[in-house]
Image: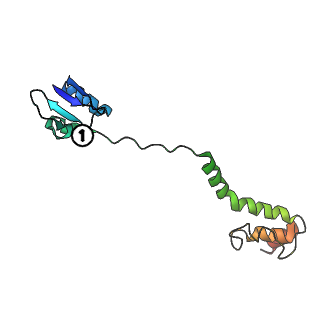
Amino acid sequence: MYKIIGADGKEYGPVTAEQLHRWISEGRANAQTQVQSEGSTEWKSLGILPEFADTFVRIQPPPPQVETINAQRWAEETIARNYQIEHCLMALGFGGLGGRGLSKSGEKFGYLPTRHNDAIFAILGEELGFAGAVGVILLY
């Protein structure tokens, strides 16, 4: 039989070793919990008593907390993933049938971060239009 001092500073007991094992597994007592064995006047930490040492070894850490879904961050990440594609499609659409003219692309100057490699066809489509884009495909 044991007496313990709880987290609230109150003395509890007498309690059995089985009850203490249960409290440890439930997280109600830990290795720093002060315990007094029956017949003793000395308070000791629960973790230094040999009859409870194996209990603390078996305790698994709590499972990791699942991150809550942040709708704003999720929307920003989704938009960021599709940003290049959306602006490539907009560039092709702005070109229309005849195009805006060489070096008159609006998307090229400020909206497409990789316009010189990933989006070169979209820029050609905006500047030369549908007819120019079909011409580039036929030349290829």
- Tell me the quadrant of the picture where the N terminus can be found: top left
Q: How is the image coloured?
A: rainbow
Question: Which residue is found at the position 11% from the left and 31% from the top?
Answer: 41
Residue 80 image offset from top left, x and y in percent: 65, 58
Question: Which residue is found at the position 56% from the left and 44% from the top?
Answer: 69
Find residue 120 and report its image quarter: bottom right
- Tell me the quadrant of the picture where the C terminus can be found: bottom right
Question: Which residue is found at the position 77% from the left and 60% from the top?
Answer: 89
How many marks do you count on the picture?
1
Find residue 85 and report its image quarter: bottom right
Q: Is residue 136 left or right of residue 85?
A: right
Question: Which residue is found at the position 76% from the left and 69% from the top?
Answer: 121
Outermost residue on the right side: it is 98
Outermost residue on the top side: it is 14
Find residue 86 and report its image quarter: bottom right
Question: Would you place residue 138 above or below residue 30 in this image?
Answer: below
Residue 59 image offset from top left, x and y in percent: 28, 39
Disc 1 target residue: 32
Question: Would you place residue 125 above or below residue 71 in this image?
Answer: below
Check disc 1 and report its element: helix, strand or loop.
Answer: loop
Q: Nearer the viewer, residue 55 or 126?
A: 55
- Kind of residue sitting beneath label 1: Gln
Residue 90 image offset from top left, x and y in percent: 79, 61
Residue 114 image offset from top left, x and y in percent: 68, 70
Outermost residue on the left side: it is 39
The 10 Å Cα crowd at callout 1, few under 14, some 14 to 19, many 20 or more, is few
